[in-house]
Amino acid sequence: MRVTDPEKHQAKKQMILDAAKLCFAEQGFHQTSTAQICTAAQISTGSLFHYFPSKKSIIAALVEEDRQQTQELVATLREQDDLVAALNVFFDVVLDVAGDSILSALALEIAAEAGRDAEIGALYRLNDKVMREELEYLISLGIERRQIAGVFPAGTAVHCLMIIVDGIFNRVALDPAFKPHEHQSALRAMLWSVLGHTANAGVQS
């Protein structure tokens, strides 16, 4: 009986996901065929379906990967004593993703697919819920430590923060000339006008 090496198995899955990201970002989910993903990953069709039974399962895996990365990031930020710096790091990660043409295009593709497919939509909404809950925890902790003024309740502040984040990605989609990091200071000022700690709205962490 053949025994699968877990590390090699996971590495192969990740290689397929990375290839799929490029294809989906460049062509969109529905314009990308499994054959194109196989070509990009340099594997056979049979090998692809051994790891992912369908193209939809690849999309679901990408959504789940995004949730895992969010949880890992916030777990790291929770360990910081300075929650102002932690939230600045989170916001800069958002700018990094929005400023990356592949990652931002993929994020918009996932958002669009969430509106078309019920299962992907459920996973996408779970991701949003996890992100909101994690941010609310960080903001609440910052208010408790008196590092954040708490102009608005943490839940309200999170909704406003998510509106800013969504707006950044929409602006990237509409205006190819828009580079989020070029507006970091202004965008941080928007963030901290909601959270109530304007002294840390600049580019320094």
Image (spheres, grey):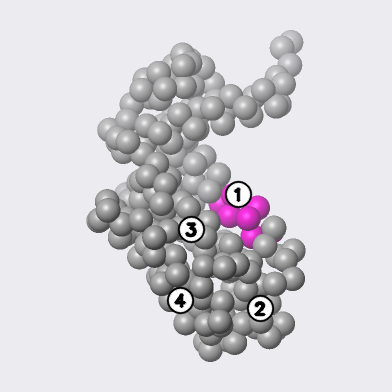
Q: Nearer the viewer, residue 202 or 91?
A: 202
Query: In percent of the image, x 67 and y 23: which residue is there?
Result: 8
* Residue that mark 2 sits on: 142
* Residue that mark 3 sits on: 94
Q: Which residues are magenta?
A: 67-75
Q: Nearer the viewer, mark 1 or mark 3?
A: 3
What is the tally of numbered marks visible in this picture? 4
Q: Nearer the viewer, mark 2 or mark 4?
A: 4
The image quarter containing residue 11 is top right
Give the CA separation, mark 4 to mark 3: 15 Å
Q: Nearer the viewer, mark 4 or mark 3?
A: 4
Q: Is residue 93 left or right of residue 78?
A: left
Give the CA separation, mark 2 to mark 1: 23 Å
- Residue 92: in magenta span: no
Q: Secondary structure at mark 1?
A: helix
Q: Nearer the viewer, mark 4 or mark 1?
A: 4
Disc 2 residue type (three-letter): Gly
Q: Is residue 67 left or right of residue 79?
A: left
If you read the primary sequence from the N terminus, does the residue marked by circle 4 or circle 1 appear first? 1
Give the CA separation, mark 1 to mark 3: 15 Å
If you read the primary sequence from the N terminus, does the residue marked by circle 4 or circle 3 appear first? 3
* Residue that mark 4 sits on: 189
If you read the primary sequence from the N terminus, does the residue marked by circle 3 or circle 2 appear first? 3
Q: Main secondary structure of the magenta part?
A: helix
Give the CA separation, mark 2 to mark 4: 17 Å
